[in-house]
Image (spheres, rainbow, N blue to C red):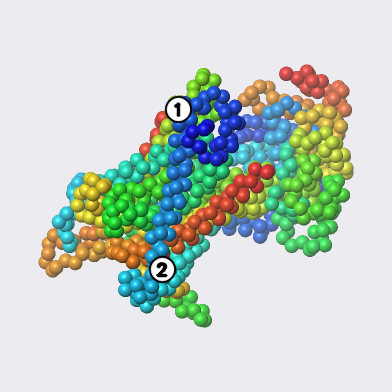
Amino acid sequence: MSAVTVGTSDETEQIRSLLTSGDKGRKRTDRIMTMLVYGAFGLAMLPLVSLLWTVVVNGASKFNPYFLSVTMRGVFGGMDAGGAYHAIIGTLVITLCASVLSVPIGLLTAVYLVEYGRGPLARAVTFFVDVMTGIPSIVAGLFAFALFTIFLGPGAKLGIIAAVALSVLMIPVVVRSCEEMLKLVPNELREASYALGVPKWLTIIKIVLRTSVAGLTTGILLAVARVIGETAPILITAGTTDSLNFNPFDDRMMSLPVYIYRQYAQGVATCRDGQLDCIPDINYMRAWAAALTLVLIVMLLNLAGRLVTRWFSPKLR
Amino acid sequence: MAQRIDVKDLNIYYGDFMAVQGVSMTIEPKSVTAFIGPSGCGKSTFLRTLNRMHEVIPGAHVEGSVELEGVDLYGPEVDPVAVRRTVGMVFQRPNPFPTMSIRENVLAGVKLNNKKISKTDADDLVERSLRGANLWNEVKDRLDRPGSGLSGGQQQRLCIARAIAVRPQVLLMDEPCSALDPISTLAIEDLIQELKKDYTIVIVTHNMQQAARVSDRTAFFNIAGTGKPGRLIEMNDTATIFSAPSEKATEDYVSGRFG
Amino acid sequence: MTTASPPAHATRHEPRRRRASGDTERGFSRVFRWITTGAGVLLLGVLAAVAAFLVARALPAFTASQAELLADGKLPAGVTSIAQYVGPLVFGTLLAAAMALAIATPIAMGIALFISHYAPRRIASGIGYVVDLLAAIPSVVFGLWGGRVLAPLIADFWVWLVGVLNVLPFVEFRATATGRSLATASIVLAVMILPIITAVSREVFLQTPKLHEEAALALGATRWEMIRTAVLPFGRSGVISAAMLGLGRALGETMAVLMILSTGLGYSLQIFGAGELTTIAANIASRFPEASGLAVNVLIATGLALFIITLAVNMAARAIVARRKDFSGAN
């Protein structure tokens, strides 16, 4: 069947020119846009790489067991001493309190939205969860401050106030991620449980929450990672201090982000001539070391969150 | 303006997986060629290699040649974008751009190809293309309404109008009626009969009656088993394929004894 | 259903629900429903409390006489009323956020397209993870980096740019040699809001129906033309809401501005200069620790303004997203 007449060479030429005549202008536009898209990606990588690089390089000089285990008590001027122990403890205590406050509320709200939520109340909750994710952190700080002024009078600075401020920021994040996870639980599992005569609340606790526990853990860890780096609300609610404080209900409490800010804000230390153990840049060096600590904590939380999902999530299909 | 297509020893791969093996065929100009065969036999995949649409999937590549009037579509100097302009395509499900009006949908391809077109020329082209797709009378009063507001059959004819507005040489149709009701299907089949006066048409269909109704020549594809590549079993005049096929497999398939 | 009246909606839906879930909705199941519903209500209560407390504590600043304000409000020199104070702050906040948005949106769209349509499939998800990494870095670290690394680095560039711009008639920019200007702060803000804009845009771009993309390609469109005809129109509202979410974040961001910008107070377009402008959040963070009495109320009043602005921006963004959902559901 291939013996049929082949088209005249004229027509062949016509087709050839049709097929090879890529419009120069259009091709150029396409190439330029491709370069711009690649360029945008490269441009965004610059600050990320630069930031991580400087944090690691500058932070490494003071990041050591000594830095992690001493406070700033009695440290002044350009002394080559002091650490972030009190700030790390403060961050852990405040974040723990914030989690204790927000995880139950957030998780139960997510259960409500997924398992019970119908009608205007559920729609209102969904909408305002989204609105709450947009509250500026400093406003959350102001709210917590204003709230505690009623009980404690003006000027009270406690770890627990900061925890309340952080939980305002944390609750919507917990709700959102837990909601996503609960929605992933297939309906057949719930129905199978009902069919066995298990009441709804037990179904939710033993089947739904049990099935999604890995995802819930991940969501909560990521929410913790989000708020652990918050600075402004803690700065105006827990204040600053140089000493160790384990009690969120008594006195000021330092935290790692605020510590970084304080060290940065103190700037270059003045050294007298001939003072040997004085380092002008010591405050910045501590700030970088604390930044490295904070970034490591955040990265660990993120990593842990992802590993939990990978290792412990049940195989649904 | 219709052209002949010569395919020689074409193998189609997705990555390392060979999807279609050793296809050689000639598609005559100004005729309708139908591809039939069971699901997964590679007929749609093969159709897509005729305008290099399969390259949308990463890792897809071919061996062999596809020549349009003697010019290899896979030649080194050939621009795949130009190939798709020359060989138009209509898809299984109607896919008008939802953000564009009917008029803009028809002009979409032209607007891409040469940016400037006068309003009268554009009006002309819209009318000619929509008339060509037997849609003009139904939509002429609402050209500025969104194309997604039309019925399924109308949407599919709008897509055909959009495809012929760029004046292709060849029109590929990938099961164009599978998402349509019987009446819309008939309208499209009538349209295909008219379009073949001007275009070389290749249609993939699951519906053997349709192949018998609309096509001049029919190619039967089959697959030996899961994981094996699809092959061209037999190609001949449609009447011959349906009345006196030379292969046993073809006879089984067209008489419904398949599988 | 006679004791402890549940919320109105629950009563209304009760009959259908009882039939749907059979006999299981009794005993502790009912209590459990109330507990979870209570958590939802509590969440609404928290949001209402945030608004209520801000208003209540801001009120004294509005009702105080001018004399009281001047005596006890710790207003900056030359400012005699709350409006004169809030005005420039709002201006600076909007200017910084708008510049950050103008920088971040095109780049974020580029990255989103890179991930959705340009990058090889295998590395695309890895890139998504790297962009999420940006979102995980605390703002105070961004501030530290911006103040210690970026500002000194970019100062020379600003000085040069101002030299070029000042050639134009009627233009007279001042550039600070320290780099502690609003322009630098905006760049850092832009980097910080990149991840959220990228993430939302990427999701929308990935949802573009394959059918539409193939329709464009089959008409002989190049990759960019396919994106322009099929992907961008489909994703337009998604990108707009993504940008507004980014805007909301940029408006409320504190530390990056506080640690980079050398602040001032005024209506000024001197984005390359020092001591010209400030933002609400940075102003609160820098003054609040030392404030007392009426000064606290004044700062909370500025915080209320910030709250209202971000609320409006975020609600608008969410409304666009919600409308989009209806639209795509119809398809």
Q: Would you call the spot at circle 1 few (<14 residues within 10 Å), some (14-19), or many (20 or more)?
A: some
C309 sits left or right of B210 in the view: left
B166 or C39: nearer the viewer: C39
Determine if residue A209 is in view: yes
Q: Would you call the spot at circle 2 few (<14 residues within 10 Å), some (14-19), or many (20 or more)?
A: few
Q: Secondary structure at mark 2?
A: helix
Where is residue A122 shown, x and y percent of the image?
A: 53, 41
Determine if residue C191 is in view: no
Label 2 marks a residue whose chain is C
Give the mark nearer the N terminus: 2 vs 1. 1
Q: Which quarter of the image is occupied by the C terminus of chain B?
A: top right
Please say if C35 is above or below B169.
above
Where is residue A225 shown, x and y percent of the image?
A: 37, 45
Please say if A240 is above or below B175.
below
Q: Residue at x 19, y 52 (%)?
A: A243
Q: Secondary structure at mark 1?
A: helix
Label 1 marks a residue whose chain is C
Tell me the residue that label 2 is attached to. Answer: C63
Disc 1 residue type (three-letter) = Phe
CA distance separating discs 2 and 1: 51 Å
Residue A301 quadrant: top left
Q: Residue at x 23, y 61 (%)?
A: A281
A163 sits left or right of A127 in the view: left
Disc 2 residue type (three-letter) = Thr
**Do badges 2 and 1 share one subunit?**
yes
**Numbered circle sitting on residue B82:** none
Residue C278 quadrant: bottom left
Q: Residue at x 78, y 22 (%)?
A: B253
Tell me the residue that label 1 is attached to. Answer: C28
Where is residue A283 shown, x and y percent of the image?
A: 23, 59
C81 or C159: nearer the viewer: C81
